[in-house]
Amino acid sequence: MALPLEGRSAVVTGAGRGLGRVEALELARLGAAVVVNDYGQPGRDGSGTASAGPAEEVAAQIRAAGGRALAHTGDVADFGQARDLVELAVAEFGALDILVNNAGILRDRMVFSMSEGEWDSVMRVHLKGHFNTTRFAAAHWRERSKAAGGPVYGRIVNTSSEAFLAGSAGQPNYAAAKGGIVGLTTSTALALAKYGVTANAICPRARTRMTEDVFAGAGFEPPAEGLDPLAPEHVAPLVGYLASPAAARINGQLLVVHGGMVAIVERPRVQAQFDSKQDTFSYDELDALLTPHYADRPQGETFAAAEVLGLRRR
């Protein structure tokens, strides 16, 4: 019996550790040949000397299990190196079929204390990194579609976060970048649908190097025995599924995943609408309409999508 991704090729960024690692292993288990990308810096804030070790180790693990894999240690936030990554997959495997964007860093700070560099670095790795690889993969699929005279096979799985959905007070850069990734995903989904390509985003909740201190002391300690509900292994199957032919009708979607749960996030809906009785609103009219609408909400309370979803806020 053929595996779901047999004959397909994939690129997974940030795949040397954590979520990216288990995602690369899952795609390989399902039959895909994988380019394992990881810049290899040890610090979760993007600090430290880059190393080929993490990417090479995951690629070697895939090969040892009988799969096909090679390592790429470039920085996906660099436009040229992202192009090289896509070109490597095409040159090595004949085509690129699946792109999983996962690479990221954290530089947490309250908005009133954040430096320009802390903002720029997180936006660069997360949002620009997602754009860079998407841009070259999209061009590849468009060219293949033109040559074939019809749709081709293409899958993009991007990584957003509940920090975008529910807010995260100490992560304005990260939350903004993850929100931007959702916008990039939906735009890409619309642009590439006619070529046979789907683009979706996930909001994974997992215990990794980037999140270990977020969960520490917050009631999310790992169990004494059994699989950790926050193990990255809970996320990988959804990525494998979204990369497969079975998910052909899923496009432009956002899914939350953790601990044996998948939630499909509905697009924002209008909660209430107010129409002016004049040519345009006046201050007094808005005061008369909007102030009573929010009168029962405690001062300072914000909308939290996670509460609507029934998800525990991080």
Image (cartoon, rainbow, N blue to C red):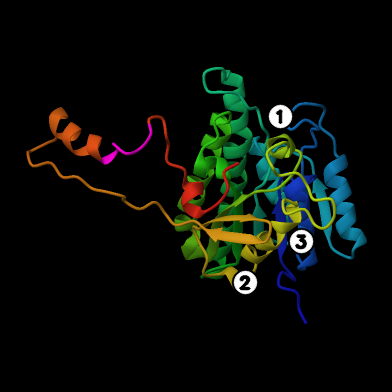
Does residue 228 appear in the picture of this structure?
A: yes
Three-letter amino acid code of the residue under disc 3:
Glu
26 in relation to 161, above or below: below
Q: Position of residue 211 (x, y in %)?
A: 70, 39
- The circle drawn on residue 45 is 1
x and y percentages locating residue 195 in the rendered image: 51, 64
Pointer 3: what residue? 26
Q: Which residues are magenta?
A: 293-298
Residue 79's x, y, as percent? 63, 37
Write the residue at 62% across / 46% down: 133
Would you identify the image quadrant in which residue 287 lies? top left
Q: Is residue 272 left or right of residue 31?
A: left
Q: Tell whether label 3 touches label 1 (CB within 8 Å).
A: no
User: Would you say 273 lies left or right of 91 here?
Assistant: left
Q: Nearer the viewer, mark 1 or mark 2?
A: 1
Q: Is residue 25 above or below residue 106?
A: below
Q: Which residue is mark 2?
A: 245
Q: Is residue 178 magenta?
A: no
Q: Residue furthest right?
A: 64
Q: Secondary structure at mark 2?
A: helix
